[in-house]
Amino acid sequence: MTKRIEYNGHTIESTTQLRGKPHGWTLEVRITPSGPAATARRCRAPNLYASKDIAVARSLEFGRRIVDGKLRPRSTRGKQ
């Protein structure tokens, strides 16, 4: 499964990580607008998933919803 997509002028990359306690894959994404002065933002949610493939798919969907303005999560701008 791809971890990075181009969507509506943005690069969306899943940055999911495996956690130990509680066990599961995190919902995390890095969104970078296209352009020379683009600043990436990282967004995450408390959701955990049993497999990496599911977490990547959900993270990319999460990123698309943010780009579309359907979600406004807290983000950390510029942190990688």
Image (cartoon, rainbow, N blue to C red):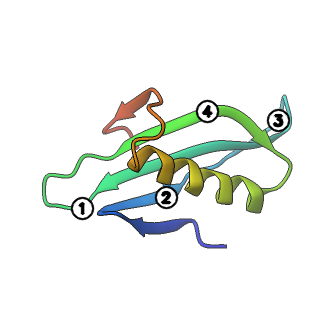
Query: Which residue type carries mark 4?
Result: Ala
Disc 4/disc 2 C-alpha distance (Å): 15 Å
- 79 or 64, nearer to the observer: 64
Name the amino acid, label 1.
Ser
- Residue at (44% x, 58% y) in the render: 12
Mark 3–mark 1 contact, CB under 8 Å?
Answer: no
Q: SS for tag 1?
A: loop
Q: Which residue is drawn at 39% across and 31% down?
A: 76
In the image, residue 19 lies at what x, y percent? 76, 38
Q: How far apart are marks 4 and 3 (CA)?
A: 17 Å
Between discs 4 and 3, the one toward the N terminus: 3
The residue beneath circle 1 is 34
Residue at image point 40% right, 49% down: 68
Looking at the image, do the residues carrying marks 2 and 3 touch, with CB atoms under 8 Å apart?
no
Q: Is mark 2 on a helix, strand or loop?
A: strand
* CA neighbours of label 1 inside 10 A, class few (<14), some (14 to 19), many (20+): some
Q: Are marks 4 and 2 in contact (CB under 8 Å)?
A: no
* Marks 4, 3: nearer the viewer: 4
Of the numbered discs 1 and 2, the one sitting upstream in the chain is 2
Which residue has dot 4 on it? Answer: 45
Which is nearer the eye, 65 or 18?
65
First in sequence, mark 3 or 1: give its number.
Answer: 3
| Residue 56 on image: x %, y % | 66, 58
Hey, what amino acid is under mark 2? Glu
For the residues labelled 4 and 1, the Cα–Cα distance comes to 24 Å
| Residue matched to label 3 | 20
Residue at image mark 2: 13
